[in-house]
Image (cartoon, rainbow, N blue to C red):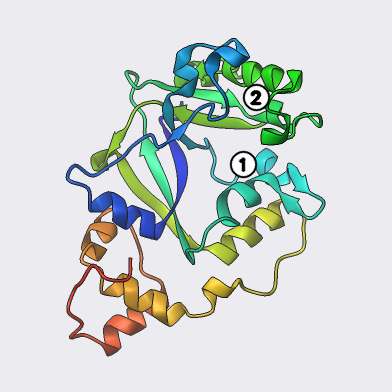
Amino acid sequence: MQSHFYHFTRVDSLVTILQDEEPSLRPRCRFIAMGRPEDYAVPKKASDFAVFGLMNPYDRNWATMEHTSDEGLIETLVSKPSRCPEFAVLKISVKPEDDIYVADFSPHMDPEYKGLHSQHEPVTKRVKKAYWDSLVPFFEYQVRDLNYALPEVVSFTPFPLSRLSIDHSIGSLALTNKFRAIAGRKPKESPAAFESSPEKWAMDVASCTHLPDLERLGYQAPRTIERHLHHHADVRPTTQGL
């Protein structure tokens, strides 16, 4: 039985976590962010903050689910909004006492559901209630073999650094194209503007005081960073740039 899940985060966000007085991956987004729980006939806990993730970081159902005619849902949710050129895929260990579940995100794919544009329509109550009702405890989900269409891990429990490791890091363009390859879509050939200066990114990460902490979590610096460290061995560590 699987006792871990995966969470995508920007490498610069990891640096922010490491700067906290008590570093941990904390719930930061509400399970149901729109409206009030009573609007959807769900408990107040539905508006609590949670950590979200996947049982498999490259889940085929998530990769193939279309968001637009040429873009997958996971591609939109994970890689497109970022201005950071590199992601870390965190592997997070789960304990039986954690307040953690698996939900089915697929009700949101109802063609009548338009997010904020349909907030006061009956379809939103239907979607949000179905989403809440799909919550099943993490380990129970695996025993019952429910095979949700879009399984999403939802944890109301924070995770200390001791339960986090970096499974791997990946550039944002490479991540986008990995999702697209799984879905059978053509790769994007033109890198986004924020990926046009990898040396600047390398300098920022290499000079960060928390680079050793990132490496202890399993972070492997890209070659651009290794080159920067090799040619600038006298760089004074600072927190500038990240």
Q: Give the SS element for disc 2.
A: loop
Q: x%, y% of residue 139?
A: 46, 20
* Horizontal side, residue 239 vs residue 74: left or right: left
Label located before the other in sequence (2 or 1): 1
State the image coordinates of residue 182 (x, y, percent, origin top left): 69, 52
Q: Amino acid at mark 2?
A: Asn
Q: Tell me the residue at 62%/41% (across/down).
A: 59
Seen in the image, is 128 located left or right of residue 11? right
Residues at circles 2 and 1 in contact by the CB criterion of under 8 Å: no
From the image, tell me which residue sits under label 2. Answer: 147
Residue 169 sits above or below residue 234 on the image: above
Q: Which residue is mark 1?
A: 59
Number of numbered discs visible in the structure rendering: 2
Mark-to-mark CA distance, 2 and 1 = 12 Å
Between 102 and 82, the residue placed more toward the observer is 82
Q: Which image quadrant for residue 161?
A: top left
Q: Position of residue 168 (x, y in %)?
A: 43, 56
| Residue drawn where x is 50% and y is 11% of the image | 43
Residue plotted at (54% across, 16% down): 37
- The local crowd at label 2, few if under 14, some if 14 to 19, many if 20 or more residues have their Cα within 10 Å, is few
